Image (cartoon, helix red, strand yellow):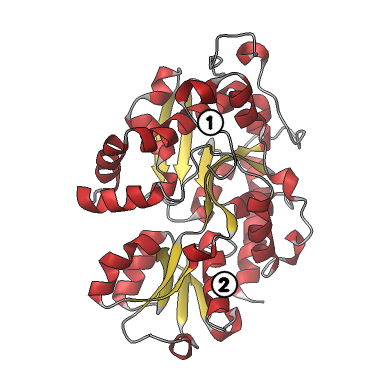
Amino acid sequence: MSPMSRYTRALSSLVVVGLALAACGGTPAASVAPTSAASPSAAAGQLPKPELTKVRIGLSAPTEPIQFAEKLADMIGIYQKYGLSVEITGFEGDGKALQSLVAGQLDFFVGSAAVAVTSVTTDTPIKLVSMNGLYITDGFFCGKDIKTAADVKGKIVAVSTFGGTSHGSVLLSLKALGLTSKDVTIQQVGGESARLAALKAGSIACAPLEIVRKTELEPLGFNVLVDVKASKLPWGRSGLMAKADFIQKNPNTVLVVVAAALEAQNSMWTDTKTAITKFAEFTQVKEDAAATRVNDFLTYGSRAMLFDQQAFIAPRDTLAAVNPAVANVDVTKTYDLSFLNKLKDNGFYKKIGAPTTVGD
C-alpha cells in the first residue's frame, strides 16, 4: 500500500474516531439557516447573539496571509464587538488541525476544501462556510542544483498532507514539467514554514511555497521551476469550516464568526497598513517582508469570501488519485453558503463595503 493510500485511510479513520470524542447530531441538511434573530426585518447588518460566548479556531497554515483574516479579527477586536471570545491556535498542515477538530479541541479551522471533500465519505461530515482564497498561489521551489525537470526526477518533494492544497500544487507543477507523481517521492512534511526549513536543510529537493517569496529565496540559490499561481486553477485553498453537527446546533455562532472574518478580510483592503503591522506581529517577520506578502494577498484573496462548487472539483479530483472513494463525491455536500447569503440579504455586506461577487 502506498503512503498516500495509508494517509487517506488514516484520515477517514481519524474522523470516525472523532465520533467517540465529540457528540454528533447526524448529517444535517446541506443548507442550515441561522435563527430568526438575524432576520431581514432587523436593522441593516445586525447580527444575532451567538449561542456560545467562546470559540476555538485553528489555522492550518498560520504563517500565510491567506489564513490571516480569522486571526486579524481577534487582533483588532471584531469578534469581541459581536460578543465572542476567540482562541486561535496554529498548526502545521490540515491533518493536525483536523485531528483537533474531530477530537473536540477546536470548533472551527481554516484549511483546504479537500478536507471537507474527504469528510463526506466518513461519519463526521465537515462543511466549509466561507473562503479566504480561491486559487493556488505557489511556486515550485527547488534546491540550487535542481534546474530542470530531469533534475527533479527521482528526488523527494515535500507536501503538507496528501490530498491537501500543497499536494495539488505539486501535481500541477509535475504536470507542467512533463512528470508525474511516479517520477518523484512525495513526502509529508507540514505547513509552509516546515517545508521551507526542510528545503534549506537539504532534506528535500523541492517544495511548493508562496510564489511571492521568489525575491526572498532566489538570492539564496533556490530555483523556481514552475509558477503555479499563473495557472489560475479554481481551488478552495483556504476556508473556514466546522463539523456539520456543530453548524446545525450553533447557527448564530457560525454566522457571527463568518461575519467577523469577512469584516477582517475586507479591512485588509481598506486599512492595509494595520493589516501589515498585525501580520508582522503575529508571524514574527519584519514589516517590509509582511508588506510584501500582504500586498501580494490583495492580488488573489477573496474580499467577498464567496465561492461556488468549482472550488471543490479540483481538490476532489486530486484526492481521487490517492483515495478512489472520493472520486464521485457530490461536492455540493461539502459546503454551506447560507451564512454568507444571509449576510448579503441582511445588509451586512453593504454595511462593511464588501463586494458580493464570487472571485471579488
Query: Foreground residue, 97 or 111?
Result: 111
Give the residue number, with chain letter if any, for mark 1: 258
Q: State whether residue 100 appears in this view.
A: no
Relative to 158, is 270 above or below? above
Q: Quadrant of residue 332?
A: top right
As shown in the figure, which amino acid type bears the numbered disc 1?
Val
Q: Residues within 10 Å of mark 1 (few under 14, many from 20)?
A: many
Q: Nearer the viewer, residue 354 or 181?
A: 354
Q: Position of residue 162 (x, y in %)?
A: 57, 65
Q: Position of residue 87 (x, y in %)?
A: 41, 33
Q: Residue at x 54, y 65 (%)?
A: 231
State which quadrant residue 274 falls in: top left
Q: Residue furthest bottom?
A: 150
Give the answer, above or below, for where 188 lies relative to 73: below
* Left/right of residue 348 with respect to residue 145 in the rendered view: right
Horizontally, residue 186 falls left or right of residue 19, namely left
Q: Is residue 199 above or below residue 35?
A: below
Q: Which residue type does callout 2 highlight?
A: Leu
List the residue tagged with mark 2.
Answer: 171
What kind of element bears circle 2?
A: helix
Which label belongs to residue 190?
A: none
Where residue 306 sits in the image (x, y, percent)? Answer: 59, 39
What residue appears at the point 33 percent right and 63 percent down from the top-left corner? 213
Tell whether label 2 touches label 1 (CB within 8 Å).
no
* Label 2 Cα crowd, 10 Å radius (few <14 / some 14-19 / many 20+): some
Q: Does the rendering let one see residue 6? A: yes
Mark 1 or 2 closer to N-term?
2
Give the residue drawn at x 54%, y 35%: 107
CA distance for labels 1 and 2: 31 Å
Q: Who's the residue at 52% across and 71% down the image?
A: 170
Pinpoint residue 4: horizontal percent, then vertical percent: 61, 70
